[in-house]
Image (spheres, rainbow, N blue to C red):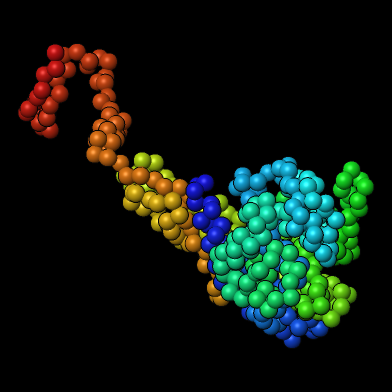
Amino acid sequence: MKRLLPVLLCLCLLSPPALAVSLRRDDDITLPAPSAILMEVSTGTVLYEKNADARLSPASVTKVMTMLLVAEAVDSGELGLDDPVTASARAASMGGSQIWLEEGETMSVGEMLKCVAVVSANDCCVALAEHLAGSEEAFAARMNQRAAELGMENSHFLSCSGLTDSDEHYSSARDIARMSRALLEHPWIRDYTTVWMDTIRDGEFGLSNTNKLIYYYPGATGLKTGFTSKAMYCLSASAERDGVEYVAVVLHCASSAERFESAKTLLSYGFANYTLLSAVGEEPIPSVRVLLGQRERVQPVPEPGAAVLVEKGGALGKLRWETELPEEVPAPVEAGEKLGCIRLYRGDELLRETALLAAEGVGKLGLFQIAGRLLAALVTDAPVEDPEPEAAEDADWGLKNPENGDTIQSLQFQ
């Protein structure tokens, strides 16, 4: 199962499930932002988009990818949050948003990551990139490789901070939503992205989050602001309520207030109009018998993203789930092999079909194992009963003539 989970997670990120309803309603929302998107995090469902594939400068929203690579390195064991990072001369020389690192100054990975998430520190961003990849150029290559893996077709990165005026550094609202969703797959990152105010250097230097939604929007979980004269005001904003989390991306806004209001409008639209339901219902999924398997049964589990967004309202009462599973399957069974499915209906309308996969592999029995099982079954299923006590000795068992009771054929037991 441990080997299966990374594969399932990858599929979950790259292949959003079928939509329950037609969710894109451009006429329902009026946004001043030239490019925007609203995505539900767990399923990847897009509820709204506006010029979502336009290639634009992302400014410091670029740092979502930087934080993602650092988070993945931490979870893989390549980095530790307490590992020391020493600032190079180049890192210390970065302009823009910064904490004024000095060359040779050392902070932990966690402290620098917090500075990136909260105050968009370019110097910490470069220091982390150099620590992880050796140089910012090598780190940018990793950023582009990860972007390709996430299906970000309209993105190309030259720097880890976004502090560049080059036309070759670009992304799109959809791509930023994808990498934001991937970052949120690391729950502990919210320990940094939800910080409103904090300090570093033993309380001598204060931090205040550039994302004002963290302070005034209920449920805000992140993620990253950005501004340059080329990119104008940008934001990737995420929020969670009642187990549903959305990410709203707005790019090229005319003012800081406009980006926050646009993101807030998108998030509020999602929370007000949709709810997240289990695509497999609440009933337990039965196990399936494995013929000639080294284990007698295998447990089906739902494919990744086994949830579905549906519009709120009276139609929720018409939902029903139907499970389709065989009573038995032949061995061998591979981990992740499709065993059946669960279909979610609203009335007669099919909303979602979710594959049920084998949670683990089950090998096939060998000839000697099969023979051993047959022998055990014979011994267990065909016991020899003792004769009645008074007939235990010298018993005469045979076929009797129904007219006179004489023995026709008998077997003597002494």
Q: Residue furthest bottom?
A: 27
Q: Is residue 81 above or below residue 56?
A: above
Question: Residue 158's x, y, as percent?
Answer: 66, 68
Q: Residue at x 11, y 30 (%)?
A: 399
Q: Residue at x 17, y 17 (%)?
A: 395
Q: Residue at x 27, y 40 (%)?
A: 366
Quarter of the image where one finds residue 250: bottom right
Question: Residue 98's x, y, as percent?
Answer: 83, 59
Residue 116 visible in rendering: no
Front-most of 326 and 224? Answer: 224
Q: Is residue 171 above or below residue 194?
A: below
Marks counted in the figure total 0
Residue 292 visible in rendering: yes
For the C terminus, which image quadrant? top left
Question: Residue 322's x, y, as percent?
Answer: 52, 63
Question: Residue 189's x, y, as percent?
Answer: 73, 53
Residue 26 lies left or right of residue 140; in this view the side is: right
Q: Is residue 374 above or below residue 341?
A: above
